[in-house]
Image: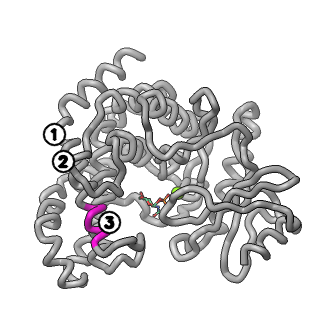
C-alpha cells in the first residue's frame, strides 16, 4: 500500500522510509530521498470521516497566510504527480509535507522556555488568522471539543458500557460525575458572545511545534483538527500536556505534578501574542481552560474504556482506565492550585497591558 502512495508522489525506489512520531490517531513516516526529505501522513479515516474537508481547510488557511504573512514559515502539502494535495489509495488517505530542514520536534516540555515558545507559536497562529473568517472552515470532527457532548457520551457509556469495567471504574466514575460543574461553565462560555469562535488548532501538544537548533519555535504543524473553536481548547491542551513532567501514559500517578513555572511560561507566551485579541471575559477563563481540557480528556479515556477501547485502542488491559485516572489526578492537582494560578494569570495580564 505504502509503495502505491510513494509512486503517486513520484518517488523512485531509492528512498528511506521510517516511522515518525507517537500520535494515537494518524500514522506518520519520515521519507529521505534524492528530491529531499518529507513527512508522509496517513489520515485515520475511521476518525476523520471526510478527510477532504481537512484538505480544503489547509488550502484556505495556507492561501491566507501566504497573502498576509508571506515571511512566515508554514509547511504546505506537496502535490502528487496528478496534482492532488491528498491522495486516496484503497480507501486510505495520505498527505505529504516537505520536511523543514534543521527543525526538530520534542515529545515532552523539559524547560519553561520550550513551553513559552510553543505557546507563542500557537498564539501567533490564531492571531495571524484573526482576520480570517473562522466560520469558513469546515468542522473536520463535528463536536470535537464540545464538553457537553463528551459528557453525554460518558453518561451513555454508564448505561451501555461493559459491566465488569463499570464496576472496576466505580470510584473514578463518581469523581468525574462530581466535577460536572465544569460542563455548566462550558455551557455559559458557549452561549456568551464574548467568547469568539476563532481559528483553533485543537491539538496543541508540544510535538506539534517545530523548533530550531537554538530552541526557538519555528511554526505549528498537524492541522487536521484546525477548525472554528474557542481559545480555551488550545490553551487548555497546552496546560494539560506541558504542566506535568509526565504524560497521560504514566502509570505511577505520584509522579504527576503541576509546574508553576511552566504555567507562567504558557501565559506569557500565549498572551504575548493574543493579549489584544482576547476579550476580558476570555482572559478571565484562561485558568478554567486547563480544567476544561483535563476533564474532557479524562472523560474521553474513561468513555472509551467502558466501550471496550474502540477509539483509542490499548497496549495493555486497563490502559484507558489508567489514562483516565492519570488525567483525573492531574485535574485534581490543578484545581488545588487554581488560586495561585489565577494570580499568575492576573499579574501577567496586567503587566503586558
Ligand atoms: C488524539 O492522535 P493524537 O495523539 O494527536 C486525539 C486528541 C487527544 C489525544 C490524547 C483526533 O490525538 O484529541 O487529546 O489523542 N485526537 C483525536 O493523546 O481524537
Ligand atoms: Mg493530531
Q: Is mark 3 within 8 Å of ligand 1?
A: yes
When the figure is inspected, residue 158 is found, relative to residue 348, above or below; the finding is below
What segment is highlighted magenta in the picture?
Answer: 318-324
What is the CA distance from the residue labelled 3 to the residue labelled 2?
16 Å
Classify the position of the C terminus by image quarter. Answer: top left
Q: Is mark 2 within 8 Å of ligand 1?
A: no
Front residue of this view, candidates 222 and 127? 222
- As drawn, the label of residue 13 is none
Secondary structure under the numbered disc 2 in the rendered image = helix
Secondary structure under the numbered disc 1 in the rendered image = helix
Identified at 32% across, 80% down, the residue is 308
Mark 3 or 2 closer to N-term? Answer: 3
* Residue 220 locus on image (x, y percent): 59, 43
State yes or no: residue 209 in magenta. Answer: no
The residue where tag 3 is placed is: 301
When the figure is inspected, residue 348 is found, relative to residue 319, above or below; the finding is above
The residue where tag 2 is placed is: 332
Kindly indicate whether the residue at mark 2 contacts the one at mark 3 (C-beta within 8 angstroms).
no
Front residue of this view, candidates 5 and 174? 5
Amino acid at each position: 500500500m505504502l509503495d502505491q502512495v510513494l509512486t503517486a508522489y513520484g518517488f523512485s525506489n531509492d528512498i528511506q522510509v521510517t516511522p515518525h512520531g507517537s500520535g494515537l490517531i494518524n500514522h506518520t513516516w519520515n521519507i529521505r530521498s534524492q528530491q529531499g526529505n518529507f513527512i508522509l501522513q496517513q489520515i485515520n479515516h475511521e476518525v476523520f470521516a471526510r478527510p477532504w474537508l481537512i484538505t480544503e481547510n489547509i488550502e484556505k488557511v495556507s492561501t491566507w497566510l501566504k497573502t498576509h504573512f508571506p515571511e512566515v514559515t508554514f509547511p504546505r502539502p506537496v502535490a502528487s504527480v496528478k496534482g492532488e494535495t491528498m491522495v486516496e489509495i484503497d480507501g486510505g488517505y495520505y498527505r505529504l509535507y516537505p520536511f523543514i530542514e534543521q527543525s526538530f520536534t520534542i515529545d515532552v516540555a523539559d524547560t519553561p522556555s520550550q513551553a513559552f515558545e510553543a505557546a507563542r507559536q500557537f498564539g501567533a497562529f490564531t492571531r495571524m488568522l484573526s482576520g480570517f473568517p473562522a466560520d469558513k472552515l469546515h468542522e473536520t470532527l463535528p463536536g470535537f471539543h464540545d464538553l457537553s457532548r463528551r459528557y453525554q457520551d460518558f453518561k451513555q457509556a454508564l448505561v451501555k458500557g461493559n459491566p465488569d469495567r463499570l464496576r472496576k471504574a466505580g470510584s473514578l466514575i463518581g469523581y468525574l460525575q462530581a466535577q460536572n460543574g465544569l460542563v455548566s461553565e462550558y455551557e455559559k462560555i458557549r452561549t456568551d458572545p464574548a467568547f469568539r469562535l476563532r481559528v483553533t488548532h485543537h491539538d496543541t501538544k508540544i510535538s506539534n511545534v517545530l523548533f530550531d537548533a537554538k530552541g526557538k519555535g519555528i511554526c505549528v504543524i498537524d492541522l487536521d483538527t484546525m477548525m472554528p473553536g474557542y481559545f480555551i481548547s488550545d490553551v487548555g491542551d497546552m496546560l494539560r500536556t506541558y504542566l506535568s513532567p509526565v504524560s497521560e501514559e504514566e502509570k505511577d500517578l505520584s509522579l504527576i505534578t503541576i509546574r508553576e513555572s511552566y504555567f507562567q511560561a504558557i501565559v506569557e507566551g500565549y498572551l504575548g501574542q493574543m493579549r489584544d485579541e482576547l476579550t476580558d471575559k476570555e482572559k478571565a477563563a484562561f485558568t478554567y481552560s486547563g480544567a476544561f481540557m483535563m476533564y474532557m480528556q479524562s472523560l474521553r479515556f474513561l468513555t472509551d474504556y467502558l466501550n471496550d477501547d474502540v477509539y483509542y485502542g490499548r497496549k495493555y488491559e486497563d490502559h484507558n482506565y489508567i489514562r483516565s485516572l492519570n488525567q483525573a489526578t492531574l485535574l485534581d492537582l490543578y484545581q488545588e492550585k487554581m488560586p495561585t494560578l489565577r494570580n499568575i494569570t492576573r499579574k501577567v495580564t496586567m503587566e503586558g497591558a
